[in-house]
Amino acid sequence: MDALFTAAFHRSPIGQYLLAPTDKLEIIAVNDAFLGYVGRRREDLLGLPLFEAFAEDPGDAGDTGVGPLGRSIARAIETRAPQTMSAQRYPIGMTRDGKTWFEDRYWSATNTPIFDEAGQLICISHTTIDVTAEVLAQRALRSAREEAMRSARSAEANRAYLASVLRSAPVGIIMLDERGKLLHANPAHEALFGAALPCIDGTLDFAAWHGWAASPGGEGARLRPEEWPLYRALAGQTVDKCLLEVESFGPGRPHRMVLLSAAPIVDAAGKPAGATAIAMDIADRVEAEKALIVADRRKDEFLAMLAHELRNPLAPISAAAALLSLGRRDEKQVEHTLAVIHRQVAHMSALVDELLDVARVTRGLITLDTKPLDMKRVVSQATEQARPALEARRHTLHVRQPQSAAFVTGDEKRLVQVIANLLSNAAKFTPEGGIIEVELAIDERHVRTAVTDNGIGLAADMIEPVFGMFVQGERSPDRKQGGLGIGLALVRSLVELHGGTVHARSAGAGRGTCFTVCLPLADTPQLAAPAHTWVPPPGATALRVLAVDDNEDALAMVEMLLSSLGHRVISLASSRDAVRRAAELQPDVCLLDIGLPDIDGLTLARQLRADPRTRGAWLIGMSGYGQASDRAAAIEAGFDLYFVKPVDVGRLVAALAEVTPRHAEP
């Protein structure tokens, strides 16, 4: 029997060793299976205390196998019953070729006390199974499961993120699988194309789509099914920025102008997995581009018209200058020639003023001098201003007004400008001998001024654009007067500054036009007495005048004009010379150009004010700049008066009449 048990002990597939029931727990027997587990020889283990043979790894803080094993053996002895240990880590020291190392091992063991027939403890049996492979496999499985869970959570988060991006994307996005089956269309795509896209068994039916090319050079060509960008992307093509007009599948099947791009989708192996397309509604951009083209064309037309309008008065002025230079002329010729020059200069000044007015309005630089006004008075002044243009073309003017006053709150000069502009416009666009009517009406809240003509009229598509900058109406065959195409834009801006509106109405080409200005009705005011209009006194005293201007022609004209009025004039082109001569002359008046090349007029004025010999002179500035800030800068520099070129001769003569001479002229 001993031989049988010995054979069973050593050949058992389960590792086992026997321990002496002593404090050191010496190993008294060990079977072949356990020796195979730990890679040791039997003679190296027999007689060794258990925890000397299998000590903890001193370099591994996590090696705590000795304690649990010792406690399990102690409980087995104490309870005289087997103690099973759950799988635990117990690294085993290995030695080979003189080198020692510890291998991570996991064991499932049972400690059983063995008693003789008398009940005396004779040894402790330790059976163990190396479960390292199973533990590592379970750990790898658990790690794989955790990684799979993390990947799944990450994939779900990515899917939710992508879905959120697709939902909120401002462009239409659609995705198909490799067979053309609809996978996804975001809300923006549904807004563009409709939610009910045509499909056959879930596959997009391109034959039911309606679209037309809109790119330059191919506009209007209808797309065949295989020409749709998304269809081409399914075939492996990338289509970038294809401009199309498409018919939506939404209610009413509206047409959209879209920019489409499409590309194939490939999987990780590079094989086709579907296609996607992005669509953007660019109707607003297309309209904006068209508007820019129209604006650019109108700008070119405006520049051409401006050149034409400026050359027109320059031609008679040039001819007049040539005539005067001949020297052989009678008084009547001179009078007629000067009248031509005055008229043409006034016309050019009006053109420049109109341009400046538009610039000031668009930049918000116009300040209205508002007060209670009777629109009957405004209409009267406006018709008086426009009368030369009306009479030149033999138009008949009818004015209808209510008997009572029609009060508004506004700037009289600007409102006269508005009505006069409309009357002049009517005169230009009405063939000679036409009829122009002005009707003033009052309702509970508004004063309406309508200017109606029987001229060339407006097409329906020009009713609103006619108020735009640089917009020109069709010229009548006999229209001789031009324009810059900014008058009506200025009219609308000025009326809106007054809190009013202006509208155009026409029955069509050749059927006349009516422009109506509507302003808020104001309460009837207590009108103040009319302001006294100052008239310059006759017989003005001769003055010493120092005129400084780097424009020789302008300087010569000023000298001739003032000398003809009896003033003693010294004219200089250099402001440096002016400083020296002013100290010698001690003039009564210094007439100074602002834009002088060496010392500007503002600096020159300050120097003259600083010199006691010239401090008391009147300083009058002349400049082509007429902004309020320019005028303020001149007054701050010491000027008494500031004139915008071309200088109003009447105002200049009147101003000089107010000056008291500092010295009696001989």
Image (spheres, helix red, strand yellow):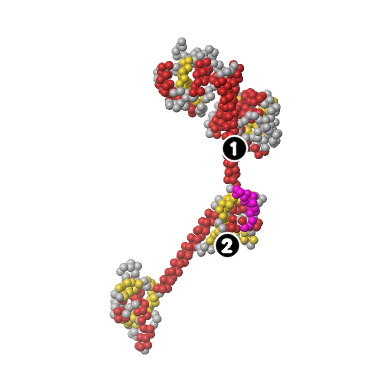
- Kind of residue sitting beneath label 2: Glu
Task: Name the residue at the top extreme.
Answer: 666
Q: Residue 184, can we see it? A: no
Closest to the observer, 598 or 415: 598
Q: Tell me which label, 1 or 2, sits earlier in the chain.
A: 2
Task: Using residue 76 as the reference point, say whether residue 201 is left or right of it.
Answer: right
Residue 137 in picture, x, y percent from top left = 43, 71
> Vertical placement of 574 versus 174: above or below?
above
Dominant SS type (magenta): loop
Q: Circle 1 sits on which residue?
A: 298
- Secondary element type, mark 1: helix
Residue 351 in picture, x, y percent from top left = 57, 29
Q: Residue at x 67, y 32 (%)?
A: 476
> Vertical placement of 273 versus 192: above or below?
below
The boundaries of the magenta stretch are 210-226
Locate residue 342: give its quadrant: top right
> Vertical placement of 171 versus 636: above or below?
below
Q: Which residue is drawn at 49% across and 15% down?
A: 567
Residue 56 in picture, x, y percent from top left = 32, 71
Task: Name the residue at the bottom extreme.
Answer: 1
Q: Circle 2 sits on which residue?
A: 178
Task: Using residue 651 as the reference point, say whether residue 17 is left or right of it.
Answer: left
Q: Which residue is drawn at 37% across and 80% down?
A: 33
> Does residue 23 belong to the magenta stretch?
no
- Label 1: few (<14), some (14–19) or many (≥20) C-alpha neighbours in 10 Å: some
Quadrant in which the N terminus appears: bottom left
